[in-house]
Image: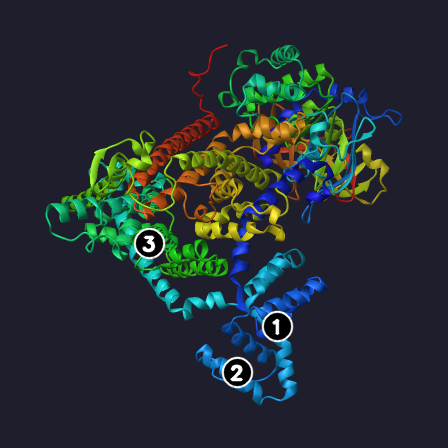
Amino acid sequence: MAELLCDDRHQSNALPVAEDVARSRVPPLPSPERVPHLSVEGVTKRFGATLAVDGVSLALSPGEFVTLLGDSGCGKTTLLRIVAGFAQLDGGRVIRSGADITHLAASRRRIGFVFQSYALFPTKSVAHNISFALDVARKKPADIRRRVKELTELVEIGGLTERFPHELSGGQQQRVALARALASEPEILLLDEPMSALDARIRAKLRAELKALIGRLGVTTLYVTHDQEEALSLSDRVAVMRGGRIEQIGAPAEIYHRPANRFIAEFIGTANLIDGRIERHGIASADARWPAKAAARLAEGSRATLLLRPEHIELVAGPHPDRGPIGTVVASSFMGAVERVSISLASAAVITVDRSSSPVGLGTRPGDVVTLIADANRAVVFAGDGR
Amino acid sequence: MTLAFPRRWPELVLTLCVAVALGLFILVPIASVLGESFVVSAPMTPARLAAVTSGALDRLPDAERAATIQRWAASATAHERVDAMAAAYALAGVRVDWDRKAAYSDQAEALQASLRRLGTGERQSIERHYPLAVVMLFKRVPLAFKVRADIGEDGFDRLRNGTESHLGLDQYIAIFTDPYLRAASINSLELGTISSLLTVAIALLIAYGVHTRAIVFPGATRVLMLLPLVSPPVLTAVSILMLFGRNGLVTHALLDRTFHLIDADTTNIYGLGGVVMAQVLSHVPAALIVLDDVMKRRDGRLEDAAFGLGVGPFGVIRHVTLPLAWPGIKRAIVLTFILSLTDFGNPLLIGRGTPVLAGIIYDQITAFQNHALAAALCIWFLVPPLILYLGLESFGRRRRFVTAGTAALSDTIPPVAWRIVLSVLAGLFVAVTAAVYATMLAGAFVHTWGSDWTPTLAYFGFGETRSALAGTGYGSADYSLASVLDSLMIAALAGPIGGLIAVLTAYVAERVRPVGADVIAFSSLIPALLPGIVFGIGYIVAFNLPFGMKSLSLVGTTAILVINIAFSKLYVGVLAARAALQRYDAGIEEAAESLGAGLIDRLTRVTLPMLTSAVLLGTLYVFVEGLTTLSAVIFLVSGNHKLAAVEIFNHANAGEFGFAASKSLILFVIAAVAIALIWRIERSTGLRRSAQRSSRRGREPDLAAVPAE
């Protein structure tokens, strides 16, 4: 898990953070007087004794791309299926443009859905898969042909129209599934882990294409994934789910840099979490004093948890007790853009730090004594243990 | 749960339709058999009979009543007067003091003497009861017809028969108390035991021989062995009679007339031995399919390992092959035992002198209309196989094993001596089977089997059948080929209906998944688990007077045949469609739904096209069943709707072998074509499945067949 998080964090580090932060200020947060394009209100769903979705409310503005992010079993797919009309809810409402569609049949919701498994019709060719919604709506054959042509060009599968699903690669199937969902020009698109069946290289490429395509079409999108990299890179807003509830919803940068609690902090990226007590200008832990601007809003002496992202700590060789906590390097690994260093403090707590890598090799060796200088502006402080 | 989803009403309607169809045409008939088996019909007591009669008399108009009673009382003969007076004594509560078993003339005198001895009050009471006694004993039938409209069908039957039914176990106990039934049950058990053991032994040897490649031409042997599966039901019995009967080719023409060795009229195949022979020949294929499956999955490497450990061939069979095949052997024994027990065609044709229960059931229904006894005997049929099954299950229960998923053939071929013995045995069996079919073929084209071997096409409608072939038999059977057309029509109707209902049932069970989905799926399997004869009787009992309404009666219609055939083989299509649906992603239907397709669009555009092969399989199995089944439909045919399979049975019963053979031949050819289609479909779906698997593994699929853009 630690490895995975390192990896993910590393890639999210490659995000143009500043740009994202900038964009997140512009974005289409639903203002009270504007009617959301799609919203769920207090949606609850039980499977036997388990509460799969626990009173979730969420609103999407027109054209907004929102991702439900969470581990399997957190209720994200169930919520998506409720919006699509595949699953029945035990409480709450689903509203589209102000109209209650909670009890509308899925076939009449005009919401596009892309399945994790793609669920292409095995007995139909690519062209007939794509034209299905138009065939069912009994559109004119000429219109259908034109639309299929448009869509195949849009998703770049022009040469494959006469093939059958089992003759396509995973990436091609995904494009067909997307084209099929878009055929009847739905204003809302739901995607259920559409990338999970693809291997990593194709995934990155398709992600970029998908983002561009959806941006161009301006369709309101609700996307489900357990892949934080996908969530952060695609979305206008990310809703992190746990145990059937939304733990935090916000722009990707906000989620990453201002996690609402310890769970989010640990779930997204790599987190150094340090328990301590609030003092003037920072937090005192068992080992050291950590400067943090955010500490000022909490009462001095109260228990608190400090979050420091690995890239928010600088390393200085040698012990400098006046500048920051001192530790010993226990491990260090080259990860491409950065070098990841694990540092053991006096209390045996291990802090992870990222520093820019250099062509001459690792700048630190196990056993080196270093001083940690944390960025007091970036440090996040949770009251208590942050749960 | 479904009810809480108002917007799923199309699914709800579909589920209800499927549930009602299965309930009505599978569960109700079987429940009816069970219910009917407890009905005991017994004569009423004189007091009860008097009450029922006087109740009926009250329905007559007042003026007519007195006159009618008087006329009927006066019309009584001397004998009737004696019986009626005795009944009047009983109604008046006076003891009959003369010998009721004496001659009527003596009784008449004794009656007068008895009356003279009685007091005035008693005498008047008897005289008063006398007219009612006459009516209730001798005029019940005309009375019943007079008041039929007023007392309803039940009241009519009760009055006419003078019997009343109540619930009881009498029909079940009859099998122990009635000597004829007792003897027949012992015969049935004896026949079942001998026949199933012989069948399984032969099938096991052949299956072993085929799969170890110990016999010559293993593939051809297997195909020939499986032929009887598509044969009309009593074909084997007919051929055996044509070969070894009183006019048989071997017994009559060869041994009797040519070599004068035996008298074919006394020395022939009729009897238990003949029935066993016919059953073994007809049931080996069923046992072979079960054992074939076990042998196919048998892992030859285990046998090689045993040989490698220095175990001899007998040791390998005893310690490796047989234990591994035991589950299959067990199933085959139970299956053939049930088949033998419930088979009435062979015993009725060949074993008339040795009554068996299945034959008695047939007689009880067709000749005596005693549905209650037939129903109870049917229920009894379930007991011995169940005991046998439980017994065999507990035997060797501790041994549990899983063989490797990929079975390899053993490289060790059994010793030469075995191969010779197995080959000869299989060869013999194949020869007999071939003889059965050759006999059918020949019999269809000769003038009179056993005496006039002139070739003719008369049995196929070319030429004057009736006059030209006069004297070949008797009876009321249909001499034209109309019944073959009827059979074809009914099978062709039942096939698609069965295929479609099967797929809808599977869809409800796999995709709609309402509360009780498993019950729905299981109901469709019930006809596979019960003897066909039970299913047939269930239809008569249930649909003779459904809900007591004559207008709803299905008995005697084409519909009852079509429905019975469709539902008795529904499970093949249900199983095939469920397997297919389980293979496909459930998201496919949801995808269609989100693309705007309602239930009908989803079914017709997405689901049914995916299930084409399941629909076809279900259709063809029902179709073949419609052509070849006898056990259920024989009770359901009527004067208007004959089935060729039933006609063949009647022809054979009447000794009209030419008609039996020609009709069998036509049915056999059509059924064989249908089965060939089934095999093709099963093979092609197998291919497609493997293609899907390979593409799912990410291997580049073969695109050679795909037209390039």
The chain identifier of the residue carrying mark 1 reads: B
Disc 2 vs disc 3: Cβ atoms closer than 8 Å? no
Label 2 or label 3, whichever comes before in sequence order: 2
Number of residues whose C-alpha sits closer than 10 Å to that of mark 2, classed few (under 14), some (14–19) or many (20 or more): many
Dot 2 amino acid type: Leu
Q: Nearer the viewer, residue B680 or B430?
A: B430
Are the numbered discs 2 and 1 placed on the same chain, yes or no?
A: yes
Residue A210 position, x and y percent, is: 65, 19
Dot 3 amino acid type: Pro
Residue A207 position, x and y percent, is: 63, 21
Label 1 sits on residue: B131
Label 2 sits on residue: B111
Determine the residue positioned at 86% across, 37% down. A297
Label 3 sits on residue: B347
Question: Mark 2 or mark 3: which is in front?
Answer: 2
Element under label 2?
Answer: helix
Dot 1 amino acid type: Pro
Q: Is residue A87 visible?
A: no
Q: Nearer the viewer, residue B671 or A344?
A: B671
